[in-house]
Image (spheres, helix red, strand yellow):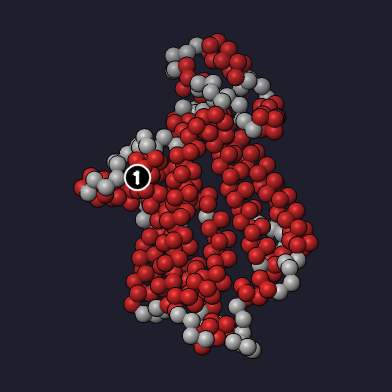
């Protein structure tokens, strides 16, 4: 409609190109900040793993090992060296090989051990993200388009309750309902073929997704309510567009950017929840390796899992922030902090 207010998303596509120079300056700051966060995580995880009670030598040799045997194994593993030499060796291994070194328990490369189990964990995380985004979008649209009516009130109560549900308890309920009684999904473990493997990941992914759906849905609902009566939406209604096309064409795209940022920042929470979910469903992923390493006081493996997870979270947050600032150039004027 000539003279009617336009959708900001359309304006971004049809007006002058994005200020790439400002975005590039912002990107340099974001990358430097991500590198500093990664280094801080490495130092913190190294210090905390050394502060754990107990030691890997007793876990590996047993409680009846002599002091001489422990000293020999400590010298073999480099644990008799000063902490700063151990830290320098860790940083050197990360820079040259992308590895933190061998496990203190079985001598296996930590990078190889994590890589062998990462497929199962990342599959759960990816499927949980898809489920969370779809579910949060549908729930937020229903709540926003029925503001202050019974669907909105009901969904707000359900979403508030969803935040308080413990993942392990929900996982056990899903196993009881859909595996034990209905036999729709396997009780535990990973299937062998692609179809069986996907079936075995559904319940763990749903359990992990429930933890972030309420946060995403509430953020998206709030953003939808800010644009639902905007001038360009009123103009779209006046042109005769159907409600479904208005939601898909005008409302969701304009409300999605803050939810996208929230999704990136909640990735660490999702991965941590997936580690717990793996133990409930007996999935041989990184979470299972983490719990075994904690039991055996394997500080090298624990440090490696923390570092690899932190690097993944930092990279995803960096890419999310770069994408948001590219799509919304106004963000580049608000500083380069993550």
In the picture shown, does residue 251 fall above or below 4? Answer: above
Question: What residue occupies the far left of the structure in this picture?
Answer: 181
Q: Position of residue 293 (x, y in %)?
A: 48, 30
Q: Residue at x 52, y 55 (%)?
A: 266
Which residue is the site of mark 1? 199
Q: Position of residue 93 (x, y in %)?
A: 67, 29
> Image quarter for residue 334?
bottom right
Q: Position of residue 268 (x, y in %)?
A: 53, 49
For the question of whether residue 253 can be seen, the reply is yes
In the image, 306: left or right of 195? right
Which of the image's four quarters has the C terminus? bottom right
Q: Residue at x 50, y 11 (%)?
A: 66
In the image, 136: left or right of 95? left
Looking at the picture, tell me which residue is in the foreground, 313 or 205. 205
Task: Determine whether the residue tagged by mark 1 lies in a helix, strand or loop.
Answer: helix
Q: Position of residue 228 (x, y in %)?
A: 51, 79
For the question of whether residue 169 can be seen, the reply is no
């Amino acid at each position: 409609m000539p003279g009617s207010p336009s959708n900001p998303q359309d304006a971004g596509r049809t007006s002058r190109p994005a200020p790439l120079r400002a975005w590039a300056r912002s990107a340099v700051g974001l990358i430097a900040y991500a590198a500093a966060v990664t280094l801080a995580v490495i130092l913190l995880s190294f210090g905390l793993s050394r502060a754990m009670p107990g030691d890997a030598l007793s876990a590996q040799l047993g409680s009846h090992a002599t002091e001489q045997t422990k000293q020999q194994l400590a010298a073999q593993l480099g644990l008799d060296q000063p902490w700063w030499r151990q830290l320098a060796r860790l940083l050197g291994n990360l820079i040259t090989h992308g590895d933190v070194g061998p496990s203190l328990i079985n001598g296996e490369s930590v990078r190889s051990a994590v890589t062998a189990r990462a497929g199962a964990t990342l599959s759960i995380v990816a499927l949980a993200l898809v489920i969370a985004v779809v579910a949060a979008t549908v729930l937020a649209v229903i709540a926003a388009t029925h503001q202050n009516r019974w669907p909105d009130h009901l969904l707000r109560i359900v979403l508030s309750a969803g935040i308080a549900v413990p993942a392990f308890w929900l996982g056990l309920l899903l196993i009881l309902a859909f595996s034990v009684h209905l036999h729709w999904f396997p009780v535990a473990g990973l299937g062998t073929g692609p179809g069986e493997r996907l079936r075995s990941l559904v319940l763990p992914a749903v359990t992990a997704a429930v933890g972030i759906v309420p946060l995403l849905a509430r953020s998206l609902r709030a953003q939808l309510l800010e644009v639902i009566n905007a001038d360009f939406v009123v103009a779209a209604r006046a042109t005769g567009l159907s409600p479904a096309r208005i939601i898909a064409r005008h409302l969701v795209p304009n409300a999605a950017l803050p939810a996208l940022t929230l999704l990136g920042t909640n990735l660490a929470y999702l991965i941590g929840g997936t580690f717990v979910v793996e133990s409930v469903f007996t999935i041989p992923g990184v979470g299972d390796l983490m719990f075994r390493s904690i039991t055996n006081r394997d500080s090298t493996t624990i440090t490696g899992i923390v570092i690899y997870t932190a690097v993944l979270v930092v990279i995803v947050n960096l890419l999310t922030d770069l994408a948001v600032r590219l799509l919304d150039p106004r963000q580049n004027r608000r500083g380069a902090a993550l």
